[in-house]
Image: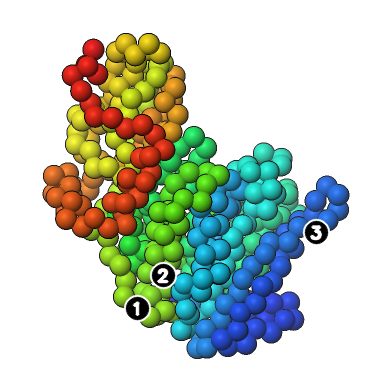
Amino acid sequence: MTETRRRKPIDNWHGLYIGPGESCDVQLPVSESYSGLTLNIPIHIRRAPVDGPVVFITAALHGDEINGTGAIRQIIQDDALPLERGSLMLVPVLNLLGFDRHSRYLPDRRDLNRSFPGGANGTLASRMAHTIVDEIVSRCDFGIDLHTAAVRRTNFPSVRADLSDPQISRMAEAFGSEVIINGRGPNKSLRREACAAGCPTVVMEGGEVWKVEPGIVETAVRGIGNVLRELGMIGGKSDRPAYQLKIESTKWVRAEMGGFLRFHFSPGDIIEKGQPLATNTTLLGRHRSVLTAPFDSVVIGMTTLPAISPGEPVCHLGRLPKGTKPADLLRIRARKAGLDERVVDELSTNVLVVEHTPEDEG
Ligand SMILES: [Zn+2]
């Protein structure tokens, strides 16, 4: 916890007192609609009987990324994480205007997650970001922001975190995803600016837009629980992944030719250098080319659209850390058969994945 950082109290929401052990639904006015209606972000504040860290859990900062919305709703409704210490600010939808249009962006096409920390006199996005920082981030000691892949793509659940910061690194490891991608995050993103303001924050990415996917929701709820347990806020035992890969560099493998793809991999798969990823064919199924993995890697994300033009992204690969052998990971995973393995199977039902055969070589 950052001792020097001055933050707003969690027990006082604009004059409404929230006592120890109490929960409360509150509203945060962030903007006004074209018809002059006030736009309120709904927030659930939950205080444990005993004081402790205050954590925000947010989703749909990109308005079409609603897997996190489903996860947060489950936490609110099922009381899945009974708090023993500290407080939670649960925010199922941050970008109300995007959410209402099933869109990543605000109505003026600005990206709210590239508008932090914002300002009181700036653009629509900048003002909204400013209110979010002032009323949510400034009340919290830690944050978890939930995202999905962009449109027409899917992501294997991963945590994005600045591993050079010991507190953030501790949260990221505790979350318990198989994949952690190291980095500070894009400029002007909520995560980066919250961290810079002294509120260690991590992002989870998983699944697709416009969906609430069971395995992704389960992964998010499990990970949030693991972090809260690490912070001493809930009891119980943490569920650890079969292995945890800290990824320092990633690469999008792109199509070299136009055509229609046969995929040979699923999100979350472990791939050896040179292994075929996808076969590009003509619409009549005639062989054009085979895309292969440039290094030993884990599949972080992929396109869900098999129709492709040169330069378009096919597969987002995370380079395996030095000394990590694909065969070892595959052996460990075969023994574990837990949630992460189930998510690989689940995500691969959204695309047709077929084995690479001699016919693919043309
Ligand atoms: Zn996002």
Q: Residues within 10 Å of mark 3 (few under 14, many from 20)?
A: few
Q: CA distance from mark 2 to mark 1?
A: 9 Å
Q: Would residue 98 be found to the left or right of residue 68 on screen?
A: right
Q: Callout 3: helix, strand or loop?
A: strand
Which mark is in front, 3 or 1?
1
Which mark is in front, 3 or 2?
2
**What's the mark number on residue 236?**
1
Q: Residue furthest right?
A: 35
Q: Residues within 10 Å of mark 1 (few under 14, many from 20)?
A: few
- Nearer-the-camera pick, 284 or 224: 284
Compared with residue 84, is residue 72 higher up or lower down, i.e. above or below? above
Q: Callout 2: helix, strand or loop?
A: helix
Q: CA distance from mark 3 to mark 2?
A: 33 Å
Residue that appears at 47% across and 72% down: 80
Residue that appears at 66% across and 73% down: 25
Picture coordinates of residue 282 (x, y %)?
Answer: 37, 12
Residue that appears at 44% across and 46% down: 207
Q: Callout 1: helix, strand or loop?
A: loop
Q: Would residue 343 be found to the left or right of residue 273 on screen?
A: right
Which badge, 3 or 2, is on the more N-terminal residue?
Answer: 3
